[in-house]
Image (cartoon, rainbow, N blue to C red):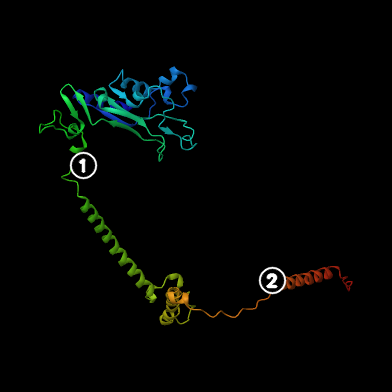
Amino acid sequence: MAFYHALEERVRSLINEGRHVIVVGDMNVVASPRDHCESARVPAAEFSAHPARQWFQAILAPQGPLMDMTRHFFPERDRMYTCWNTLIDARASNYGTRLDYTLVTQGLEPWIQHADIQPQVHGSDHCPIYLDLRDSVETSTGRTYLVDLLHGEKDGMAAPHPLPRLATSRWDAYSTKTQPRLAEMFGAQRQRQAELIIPQAGQQEHKLNQVTTCTPETIPKSELPHEPAHGAAFHPASLAQSVGAKTCAASGTRSSKRVKKNHAQATLTSFVTKHVSDPPVTRPSKTLLSTTTNNTKRQDTAAQWSSLFTPHPAPIH
């Protein structure tokens, strides 16, 4: 409820300054039972007793300063929902609620040509809502154009009301004086990418040097042989030759694999050149192998049974 009270205070402050206000978006509250798919299951008194709904009714016309323009154009429209539960695919059956609103102060009503929802537009659990404003309206002082009001001045005269104190144009983050140009933003991004690429290239070169260097100092401890027996001679040179050669051989194997892989890549000429097929290789049939294996197993089993039932000679005392 703290957000709702802060929003109301903001709206009323702007109205007291003589301004018109438009509030658009997800209010996360249902205005009336008509805007909820399960309102029939809840008694009317209990439905309206919710604190957020009581606050919403108090700020909406005729009690409050804001008009619900979508409901203003469709006062009797049922099932005008803007939010659905995606876990149960409730949008297909239009089983939802209306949580998104276009609210305007009553002084802006002549400027509103139409307001509606767009449930046919997918992409979220909410659907878009919109206001259609008129280009101009006829007032007691003549025809007033919307473009003049949006620019804040008319016929070279200053606007009667300056921008609100909390307007984003007053923030340094949105000021044209401090905000960088689009070209500078892309240039800074390229500079950051170059700074990242250079250290990565140095790390790759350092790793390559570590792999190709074969010295006793670079050999892992797990590769070192056990300590020689007491009295046995220990020669570091033989250690470097045995373990170092092993490490270098592994590195050479990896390098040769990469070379072979590159040479194995087919060229355009290899596709059009007719290759001589290799002679067929004669292999024993699976049936012959299985038959030989089965016969061997049968012979072993028969020998085991025969030894089991063979009478043994009487013991000699």
The residue positioned 33% from the left and 29% from the top of the image is 115
Q: Amino acid at mark 1?
A: Tyr
Relative to 169, say whether 109 is above or below.
Answer: above
The quarter of the picture where the C terminus appears is bottom right
Q: Nearer the viewer, residue 296 or 102?
A: 102
Q: Percent position (x, y) of residue 13? A: 22, 25
**Is label 2 in a helix, a strand or a loop?**
helix
Residue 208 can be seen in this image: yes
Query: Which badge, 2 or 1, comes first in the chain's sequence?
Result: 1
Assess disc 2: are there few (<14), some (14-19) or many (≥20) residues with their C-alpha within 10 Å of its C-alpha: few
Q: CA distance from mark 2 to mark 1?
A: 78 Å
Specify whether 121 is left or right of 163. right
Relative to 59, say whether 90 is above or below.
Answer: below
Q: Nearer the viewer, residue 118 or 16?
A: 118
Assess disc 1: are there few (<14), some (14-19) or many (≥20) residues with their C-alpha within 10 Å of its C-alpha: few
Residue topped by disc 2: 286
Q: Identify the mark at residue 118; answer none if there is no mark.
A: none
Q: Nearer the viewer, residue 52 or 94?
A: 94
Residue topped by disc 1: 174
Q: Percent position (x, y) of residue 264? A: 46, 75
Q: Percent position (x, y) of residue 31? A: 38, 24
The residue positioned 35% from the left and 27% from the top of the image is 70
Q: Amino acid at mark 2?
A: Lys
